[in-house]
Image (spheres, rainbow, N blue to C red):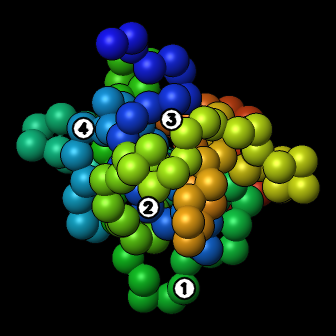
Amino acid sequence: MTAPTLGVAEQYCTFWVDDLYFGVAVAEVQEVLRHQPMTPVPRANEAVRGLINLRGQIVTAVDLRVRLGLPPRPEGALPMNVIVRSRGEVVSLLVDDIGDVIDPRDQGSLELEPAPSNMPADVQDVVLGVRPLPDAILLVLDADRAVDVSAVPDTSGGNP
């Protein structure tokens, strides 16, 4: 059996951000958590919502809604945390809701396809490709690019 190539993971941890259905390779996911209290980071990029204390480990929380240029989360809706390993660090991706762990091959999706050209540029920037499923399109997230907030214009002037 050969090892899967980049972006052709066998299983994905799935989640929603706005109405977009994402998956990140299970091998890149450390854990999934409910909303956690955050400590704001003064002058940080707007996409960095704060720091989470994860059993003594300090983890940066990146809001995917901000990172992808999507509208703010509805008032009172608390984000969930998908804790991923990226470039030797542990980072929390703040998402709207958590899905299941899926194997797209079990659902007839055999290959990763390129992201459609009409997809917003902010989303294309963080997606390795798409996996068509019987009832949805899975956007396969590149965790390394998703946590890179240097490409996100900061319109807030930095968090207070």
Viewer-nearest of discs 4 and 2 = 2
In the depicted structure, whether residue 67 falls above or below residue 148:
below
The residue at the point 38 percent across, 76 percent down is: 78
Sequence order check, earlier mark of 3 and 2 = 2
Picture quarter containing residue 44? top right
Residue denoted by label 1: 74
Q: Position of residue 134 (x, y in %)?
A: 56, 66
- Label 4, label 1: how far apart the Cα atoms are: 27 Å
* Label 1 SS: loop
Q: Do the residues labelled 3 and 1 touch (CB within 8 Å)?
A: no
Q: Position of residue 3 (x, y in %)?
A: 39, 14
Mark 2 surroundings: few (<14), some (14-19) or many (≥20) residues within 10 A: many
Residue denoted by label 2: 15
The residue at the point 45 percent across, 55 percent down is: 107
Amino acid type of the residue tagged 2 in the rendering: Phe
- Label 4, label 3: how far apart the Cα atoms are: 12 Å
Q: Which mark is residue 143?
A: 3
Q: Are marks 3 and 2 in contact (CB under 8 Å)?
A: no
Q: Do the residues labelled 1 and 2 touch (CB within 8 Å)?
A: no
Q: Do the residues labelled 4 and 3 touch (CB within 8 Å)?
A: no
Q: Where is residue 72 in the image (x, y as percent from the top left)?
A: 62, 75
